[in-house]
Amino acid sequence: MNLQNKLDNLLADIKNSGKTPSLMLHTCCAPCASYVLEYLSPYFAITALWYNPNILPEDEHSRRFAALQHLLQCMSFPNKVELVQLPDDPEDFREAVRGLEGKPEGKRRCEVCFRLRLERTAKLAAQYRAEYFATTLSVGPRKNVLLLHEISAELSEGYGVAALPCDFKKRGGYARSVELSREMGVYRQGYCGCGY
């Protein structure tokens, strides 16, 4: 499945329509958000959602949220971009992955973590009556894009909001996120955030 081709077609349709649909975008961190916001803001009015109960310890969580706020102050966007922060209790993450603590990165624990954050995103997208939802997670070179897509497609049916087809590391997305982070002095973390 070529998610980039699907996204290209969708963005062409949006451009031709002259409309600006709304997008609920889960943001995992400022570096990943930098490229995705640059890429999508010409097409969408974006609500950047901060919900990451997996990021531990607390000072790391705070540092990453502050980096996202800094990024949004430094960047300018063709369409509206607003930030929404949901309360994210680390206990929600710990409870969701209970029994999977010792599993390696990229396996079942990551799947549960993706689902936890994507479900909150889809649910909020439905509440906001957003037309689409997505996550910046696919910028990361170690993230399972097809798994993210499968979870998003399932949640799309359940919440009645279209899942944006995306593999944001395509077309140099990861490299651009590194470049933008450097240009704006944005903190780049050394791990996904999971305390395990």
Image (cartoon, helix red, strand yellow):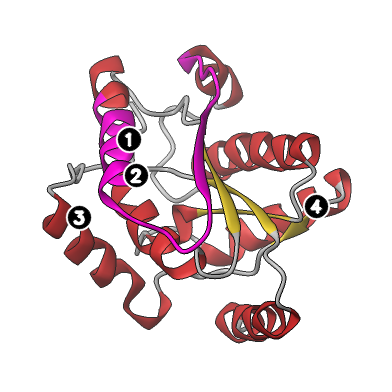
Q: Which residue is mark 1?
A: 69
Q: Residues within 10 Å of mark 3 (few under 14, many from 20)?
A: many
Q: Quadrant of residue 180?
A: bottom left
**Label 3 element class:** helix
Report if the CB atoms under discs 4 and 3 are less than 8 Å apart.
no
**Residue 27: x, y in percent?**
46, 44
In magenta, the rendered stretch is 63-90
The residue drawn where x is 25% and y is 42% is 191
* Image depth: mark 2 or mark 3 in front: 2
**Residue 186: x, y in percent?**
18, 46
Tell which circle, 4 or 3, labels the residue nearer the N-terminal end: 4
* Image depth: mark 4 or mark 1 in front: 1
Q: Which residue is mark 3?
A: 181
Q: Measured along the vertical axis of the image, is residue 69 above or below residue 160? A: above
* Image depth: mark 3 or mark 1 in front: 1
The residue drawn where x is 26% and y is 70% is 176
Mark 4–mark 2 distance (CA, rounded to whole Å): 25 Å
Mark 4–mark 3 distance (CA, rounded to whole Å): 30 Å
**Label 1 element class:** helix
Q: Which mark is residue 96?
A: none
**Label 4 element class:** loop
Q: Which residue is mark 2?
A: 72
Mark 4–mark 1 distance (CA, rounded to whole Å): 26 Å
* Image depth: mark 4 or mark 2 in front: 2
Q: Which residue is mark 4?
A: 161
User: Viewer-proximal residue, 71 or 176?
Assistant: 71
The residue drawn where x is 57% and y is 51% is 46
**Residue 80: x, y in percent?**
53, 52
The amino acid on which the numbered mark 3 sits, given as a three-letter code, is Ser
